Image (cartoon, helix red, strand yellow):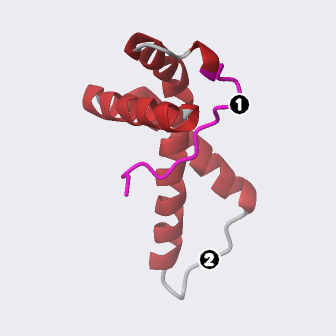
Amino acid sequence: MSKFQINIDFSNVDFTSLETDDDFTREAKILLPQALVKLGETVGEKTWEELNKTKGTGTKQKSSQSEKRKFIQETGKNYQRHASNRERQELEEYIVEQLRIHKQ
């Protein structure tokens, strides 16, 4: 099982143009920024759930959906901006794998 629990949107990918390793890598680089945001949003959603679980019974637990959505979106953008080179490379390699699977 992959450590990346995201769905990547391949709807704009022309799979017929993907023939060489360079083609797959180029396409992965195009998809990488959005994949980083999605990965960050996944982390943000899990963090939000954990934060709400750990709130004490005496505190207000009503958080609006808009607050949750804003937190998740901000986490996604921050992850995209601050991901390490290693994380970027690993995600790029994962995207290449997924492109190869979807091409078959």
The question of residue 30 being in magenta is answered with no
Q: Which residue is mark 2?
A: 61
State the separation of the CA atoms marked 1 and 2.
Answer: 39 Å
Q: Quadrant of residue 84?
A: top left
The question of residue 11 being in magenta is answered with yes
* Residue 24 visible here: yes
Please tell me whether residue 63 is drawn above or below residue 78 in the rendered image. below
Under mark 2, the amino acid is Gln
Q: Nearer the viewer, residue 88 or 65?
A: 88
Q: Quadrant of the N terminus?
A: bottom left
Q: Answer yes or no: do the residues labelled 1 and 2 have beta carbons within 8 Å?
A: no
Under mark 1, the amino acid is Ser
Q: Looking at this rendering, what residue extends furthest in the front direction?
A: 104
Q: Nearer the viewer, residue 87 or 66?
A: 87
Q: Quadrant of the C terminus?
A: top right
The range drawn in magenta is 1-15
Lower position in the chain sequence, tag 1 or tag 2: 1
In the drawing, what numbered circle is on residue 11? Answer: 1
Residue 32, given in percent of the width and then of the height, sits at 48, 26
Element type where label 1 sits in the image: loop
**In the displayed structure, does residue 69 sit left or right of residue 94?**
right
